Amino acid sequence: MELFTFKAFAFGGELDLNRLAAKLGITRKFRWEEPMKLNPVTFALASGNGNERVYLYYFGGVVFLNCSGDLITRFLDIIPQYADSLKGQVQSPYREEYRLEIDPDCKPSIANDGAVMPFYNLAFLDIICFVIAKSVALERIEERIDVVFDEVEVLIANLGRGKLELPDRDMARLASSILSFKFTSIAHIMVLDKPDITWENPEADRLYTTMAGLFELSQRYLEIKHKSETLLDMTDVFTGLSHARRAARLEWIIIILIAIEIVIYLMQLYSGHS
């Protein structure tokens, strides 16, 4: 029996693999959907079927294959030296673990904490890494969108008391955060995309489809999409109220200016008669 262990983390944002490759002295170009596979000790491209390796994804996911805790800590401490977007980040709280057993005497079995396959296939490793990297990246977005919901909840409470104090800059920042959730979950994490290998390999397709269902990738994406649309609707309401308030203030200013002008005119008229 052969055992593979996976530990996935999510960085705080997007990771430019081609820029990282240049700083590591790697000349190969990476497509958007393609992970960078590194040797965690030498930081060179992983070759062959080496036991330890690291999968890095554009959307900020990182998966360690058969790596010890010390090796993971060392890698996470060193990698920010080569990736500016990772500088200043603490170790990610978003994590996922998985295991794959290769046992010729067992039938294929896929669960939410591990899988058993009767034979080895590199595609199995790639798919498991892809799914759990997506999962931790979605977890990061889910937490961020919950924070925005808490902010909006405070605004709604203030609105119930007749208060709406939100500058245009903060309103724009809020809308930008909401739109980034939708864009990141669709474009960066590629929740709705399947790996190319699944179109050619039925076993790989079965593994991906089952794991995507177990980790509820589509459902979580739809929930993020629904929450984003709800937040955008709320933002539209706040924006409309803010514009109405500004228009009302402008009208009152115009009325006051007209009143002042009338008073000045009457005073001048009275002074002329005197």
Image (cartoon, rainbow, N blue to C red):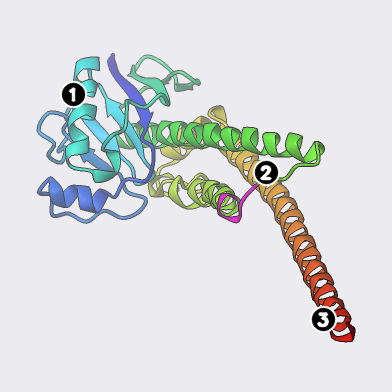
Determine whether, in the image, residue 32 is placed left or right of residue 135. left
Tell which of 239 and 17 is nearer to you. 239
For numbered disc 2, what is the local secondary structure? helix
The residue where tag 1 is placed is: 74
Is label 3 in contact with label 2 (beta carbons under 8 Å)? no
In percent of width and height, residue 24 lies at: 12, 45
* In this view, 204 is above or below 51: below
Q: Position of residue 17 (x, y in %)?
A: 26, 49
Q: Is residue 229 above or below residue 118?
A: below
Can you identify the residue that label 2 sits on?
226
Mark 3 or mark 2, whichever is nearer to me? 3
- Earlier along the polypeptide chain: callout 3 or callout 2? 2
Asked if residue 124 is among those painted magenta in the image, a careful observer would answer no
**Residue 16 seen in the figure:** yes
Q: Amino acid at mark 3?
A: Gln
Residue 88 sits in quarter: top left
Find residue 58 and report its horizontal and vertical position in percent: 34, 46
Real-space Cα distance between discs 1 and 3? 82 Å
Looking at the rendering, the stretch of residues picked out in magenta corresponds to 166-170
Q: CA distance from mark 1 to mark 2?
A: 39 Å
Q: Closer to the camera, 59 or 63?
A: 59
